Amino acid sequence: MEIQFLGTGAGQPAKGRNVSSLALKLLDEINEIWMFDCGEGTQRQVLHTNIRPRKVKKIFITHLHGDHIFGLPGFLSSRAFQANEEQTDLDLYGPVGIKNYVMTSLRMSKTRLPYRIQFHEFDQHTTGKIMETDKFTVYAEPLDHTIFCVGYRVMQKDLEGSLDAEGLKAAGLPFGPLFGKIKQGEDVTLEDGRVIRASDFISPPRPGKVVTILGDTRKTDASIRLGLGADVLVHEATYGQGDERIAKSHGHSTNTQAAQVAKQANAKRLLLNHISARFLFKDMADFERDAQAIFPQTHVVKDLETIEL
């Protein structure tokens, strides 16, 4: 499982940062990529990665500000142009209005897609668990921005325990179909009468990963709830330490406020994105250090950076 940041800037593209988008790569888990937000230029950012657009099976939108959605029509159109690959349907989750925006853009540009988009819209009264499969559950909860905006909590379900193959060999179990029975939790009786109990050779289930990806927000308790115990918390940091007043008036957070959220949520790692263009790359060491003084496991991400979970 990996997160690759396609755009880490706020509001408008800058020379060093594109606007908001990131890819949650679940290739080993379910052979899919999930995209969160799709700002202008996202499809061009994808060209600098090994992401195949057809692998993007789900897109989650945090809110309807342009720097988070203006790249959608282009990405959805380009996704259809890879004629040598199988056309696959796509699920799109987001606030009420996202369907109208996408369909109007496609209709006005006379764009016809060879795949279907399943829209899943919600408002502040219908958030909560928005998706569940056999391996993942996704929750959305309203944040505190200037328009309706959500954060997402992606929870991987517990993973099966691993098989102690060497222990089975030492116990005299011949390699083959009987290994499969043990893996399925079935006890096996050997020819000499000995019983090999599956529970002795399978480790307990392992907890799945939790990834929290927040949209634009002021510091709010909802961010803490979404980030509780998360392996990774992705939090916006549009402003820096000392900018609390302007951050509040514009519906955003500072780097140190994000660090406070991560600390209160007992998250394992904090990744800061959505950085204002007023901050240059030479400012990032101090920007990161200020947040680390509150939450040491903080990192300010860059465009195209990949974080392994």
Image (spheres, grey):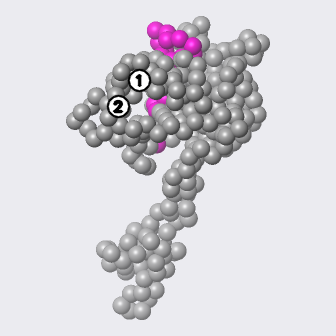
Q: Is residue 5 left or right of residue 287?
A: left
- Residue name at image x 39 percent, y 28 percent: 76
Q: Amino acid at mark 2?
A: Leu
Mark 2 Cα shell of 10 Å, populated few (<14), some (14-19), many (≥20): some
Q: Position of residue 298 (x, y in %)?
A: 62, 29
- Residue name at image x 60 percent, y 31 percent: 95
- Residue 140 covered by magenta stretch: no
Q: Is residue 221 above or below residue 21?
A: below
Q: Is residue 135 above or below residue 138?
A: below
Q: Which residues are magenta?
A: 1-23
- Residue name at image x 35 percent, y 31 percent: 113
- Residue name at image x 49 percent, y 29 percent: 22
Contact between marks 1 and 2 (CB within 8 A): the answer is yes
Checking the image for residue 117, the label placed there is none
Question: In front: 224, or 269?
Answer: 224
Give how far apart the Cα atoms at labels 1 and 2 are: 9 Å
Question: In front: 259, or 145?
Answer: 145
Residue 193 in sight in this render? yes
Residue 142 location, quadrant = top right
- Which residue lies under the disc numbered 2? 113
- Which residue lies under the disc numbered 1? 106
